[in-house]
Image (cartoon, rainbow, N blue to C red):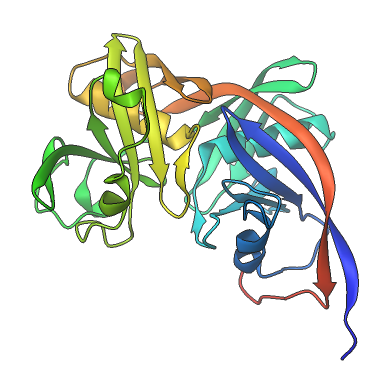
Amino acid sequence: MTMTLRTLRFHKVESVGNHFVLLDAQAMPEMDWSMLATSMCAHHFGVGADGLLVIQRSANAHFRFRMFNPDGTEDVCANGMRCATAYMHKTGHLTADEATIEAVDALHLTRILAVDNGSVNVKLNMGIPSLRPADIPALAEIDRMVDYPLQVASDVYYTTGVSVGTPHAVIFVTTESLETSIPEVSRAIETHPLFPQRINVTWCAVESRDLLRVRTWERGVGPTLGCGTGACAALVAAHTKGLVGTSARVVSPGGSLWVEWPQKQDVSVSGWTNLLYEGKWIMQSPPMISNSN
């Protein structure tokens, strides 16, 4: 069969260095987004990104949001949702400052806080976090996963497990240890048998009662410059241990986010997002159509 080339319009977006390929698929047929993610997110051979964001129509919210990691797995992504909100606002699809998003885990409320030229400050409600092993999930018979002694080879890492739509293993370290790179052991923790669905790993240093410094290893991605759910998990874990209050600035290598957890109910994250550029991805047709929703 003769193959013809066709193009797929995309946008490149980022927040705190967490960068994504965004597809406005509101008028597109369903595709194999997982396979597309592995191609487009590849560095050197693709656009290069921490994930593929797909915006679709929703009957229950202002829009439907899906995110696919570079390995093709679908996940929850706070920075991605905030970037998608900024895109919808900048392109006129959202006319109000508040909107609801249908995501794979739940409905989320998002709000435009400010616009400064091409940058948009977006606040996102991530719902009530959980430290219960069953919600992470983690194969630990305890009520809450706080300072759990996780054995990796001959070392023990005291881990606090937090689910904010996606699971994080938060490990507290010194500021000095975060200045070089993410520990290589992150890969082993991500795939540890304790976590049957793998886990994100967030290394966190407490600098003051309202300032945290983090580095995140994301499952299906690897090290990233920033992570919205990781920032939320860090604040929840630090407050649970009595190290910070109910709000803090969370600084990662790519920038800072503001996280709030009032009354230990819904946790929210806010920060600046940027629409960087748009392009055309050349793909062979016919496109790979999936029957999945």
Q: Quadrant of the C terminus?
A: bottom right
Q: Which residue sits at x=41%, y=20%?
A: 260
**One can see residue 216 in this view:** yes
Q: Identify which residue, 106 or 285, lies in the foreground.
A: 285
Q: Identify which residue, 262 or 163, lies in the foreground.
A: 163
Q: Which residue sits at x=21%, y=61%?
A: 193
Image coordinates of residue 245 in percent, x first then y, are 29, 13
- In the shown orientation, is residue 69 left or right of residue 240? right
Q: Relative to residue 59, is residue 250 depicted above or below?
A: above
Query: Residue 168's image quarter?
Result: top left
Query: Residue 31's image quarter?
Result: bottom right
Image coordinates of residue 248 in percent, x first then y, are 38, 14
Q: Identify which residue, 55 or 102, lies in the foreground.
A: 55
- In the shown orientation, is residue 265 left or right of residue 268? left
- In the shown orientation, is residue 49 left or right of residue 144? right
Image coordinates of residue 185 in percent, x first then y, are 26, 46
Q: Relative to residue 129, is residue 9 depicted above or below?
A: below
Q: Quadrant of the N terminus?
A: bottom right
Q: Which residue sits at x=46%, y=27%?
A: 268
- In the shown orientation, is residue 112 left or right of residue 191? right
